[in-house]
């Protein structure tokens, strides 16, 4: 059904503004996403609840569509230059089979980094992305935006690392003295690659769980961006 | 010399706010940078003009230091959570010897991406980063922040790609039908790696200058983030 919303005080708009907050997302167990590309990806996996756009879009009949003004679009969009499409998705239920290759985020706090890591993990065929309690929420709108729709196609699950330790070889990226060079890493068939916080790296508890601690050799500067280091590691470990 | 600034209307604060705009930066040929780590790196290469901080810092005597209130720091900082140190640097004069390994940005428009690419290029020992007219300015405060001080340690130069074609093998990252897999790329000793715009990739003119067009094999999604793809390419080409 297609409806039009003309007032910024409409109940639907208030609800969307609630979804822009962590509290609102957890209340409804829903999140906002933007753009044509992400919408296409979410439609493929039946994850679209309702759509808000400037113009009428061709959508499956069971999805409610709301036409809004540019002013309202600006209010509900989190982009500086809105593409003109915002939609609501339910939180994604995680599968119980996590697959063989996992990325674990131990306190990654920048939403752009988390979104980029989710996108990269999907692109290199990883099976799921796990994250610690101290990480940013994957439903944060900046995470969703940076994932470019990947959030709909790869499970993203909160869990503690020790839960995975039983089944998976734990490969930790850290700039420790005893870190071995990436070249020397021999991954098992089942592994979890752990990436740490932007400022503090991985936690002490995580290092204690590590089967391998590795680093990418660099020069001139202390560290790489975590999404960059993660990408090089994900690519390299999948090629081996 | 150490001075204190108490008023938000102080001429110095007005000048710093000018440096937050592209117009102001080009007028003074100076830019703003933030944080202790970046300050250390800029000091090493004598690139610090003056420093604004919440507390007195131990600095070389010829550098003017201004102590400001938290309110003023918030005004001059571009960070949501200011570290409490902002400093002014002159535009960096480029060397005339560009070295053997170059990264070229063809219309990269996201400041976070450009800053991350500059940081990664420095970390993997590239000699300089070039960028096209259509790219974001490297002195944009978000570029400077994402570079984590790398902007002081690697030349970043505006130039057209054809100028480099004479001396360098041109390796272009693009998702073209005739792109060869990264594994098959054999770089010369002198090469320039070209990365394109976030939405449109590299320009047609750039493709015409290419000696090699390459892509990183991916699945499930159309593309990688440009800073991620750039990092994997930079790392791989340097290892070969």
Image: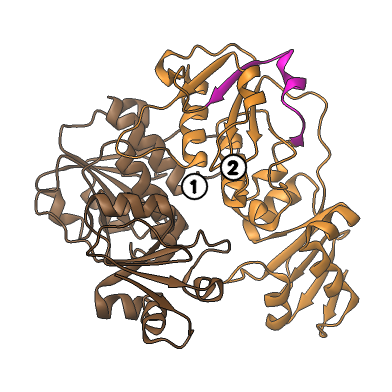
Chain colours: A orange, B brown
In this view, the residue in front, A200 or B164, is A200
Pick the residue in front: A136 or A57: A136
- The answer to whether residue A55 is visible is no
Q: Position of residue B79 (x, y in %)?
A: 52, 63
Image quadrant holding the N terminus of chain A, namely: bottom right
Direction from residue B78 to residue A21 in the image, left or right: right
In which quarter of the view is residue B212 placed? top left
- Residue B194 in sight in this render: yes
Residue B203: percent from left, percent from top: 33, 58
Up-down relation of residue A132 to residue A139 (above or below): above
User: Residue B60: x percent and y percent?
Assistant: 26, 58
**Pointer 2 chain:** A
Give the chain letter at badge 1.
Answer: B
* Residue count near mark 2 (Cα–Cα under 10 Å), binned few <14, some 14–19, many ≥20: many
**Compared to B212, does B62 lie above or below?**
below
Q: What number is the disc on residue B61?
A: none
Left or right: B158, with B58 as reference point: left
Separation (CA) of disc 1 from disc 2 = 8 Å
Q: Residue at x 63, y 46 (%)?
A: A109
- The answer to whether the residues at label 1 and label 2 have Cβ atoms under 8 Å apart is yes
- Circle number at residue B225: 1
Q: In the image, which residues are magenta? A: A157-173
* 1 and 2 marks on the same chain: no
The kind of secondary structure element at disc 2 is helix
SS class, disc 1: loop
Q: Indicate the position of residue A192 as horizontal and vertical percent values.
A: 63, 22
Query: Callout 1 environment at 10 Å: few (<14), some (14 to 19), or many (20+)?
Result: many
Q: Is residue A103 magenta?
A: no
Residue A166: in magenta span: yes
The residue sitting at 62% across, 70% down in the picture is A82
Residue drawn at x 37%, y 86% as measured from the top left: B11
- Which residue is label 2 attached to? A119
């Amino acid at each position: 059904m297609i409806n039009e919303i003309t007032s910024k005080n409409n109940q639907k708009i208030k609800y969307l503004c609630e979804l822009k907050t962590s509290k609102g997302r957890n209340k409804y167990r829903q999140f906002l996403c933007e753009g044509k590309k992400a919408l296409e990806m979410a439609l493929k996996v039946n994850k679209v609840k309702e759509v808000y756009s400037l113009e009428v879009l061709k959508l499956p009949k069971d999805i409610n569509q709301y036409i809004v003004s540019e002013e309202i679009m600006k209010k509900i969009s989190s982009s500086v230059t809105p593409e003109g499409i915002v939609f609501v998705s339910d939180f994604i239920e995680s599968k119980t089979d996590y697959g063989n290759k996992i990325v674990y985020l131990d306190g990654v706090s920048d939403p752009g980094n988390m979104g980029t890591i989710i996108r990269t993990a999907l692109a290199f065929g990883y099976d799921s992305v796990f994250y610690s309690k101290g990480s940013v929420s994957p439903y944060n709108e900046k995470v969703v935006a940076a994932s470019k729709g990947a959030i709909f196609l790869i499970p993203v699950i909160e869990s503690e690392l020790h839960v995975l330790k039983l089944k998976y070889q734990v490969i930790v990226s850290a700039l420790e003295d005893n870190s071995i060079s990436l070249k020397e890493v021999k991954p098992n068939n089942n592994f979890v690659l752990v990436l740490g916080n932007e400022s503090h790296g991985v936690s002490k508890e995580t290092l204690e769980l590590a089967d391998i601690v590795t680093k990418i050799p660099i020069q001139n500067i202390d560290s790489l961006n975590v999404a960059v280091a993660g990408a090089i590691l994900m690519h390299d470990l999948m090629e081996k």
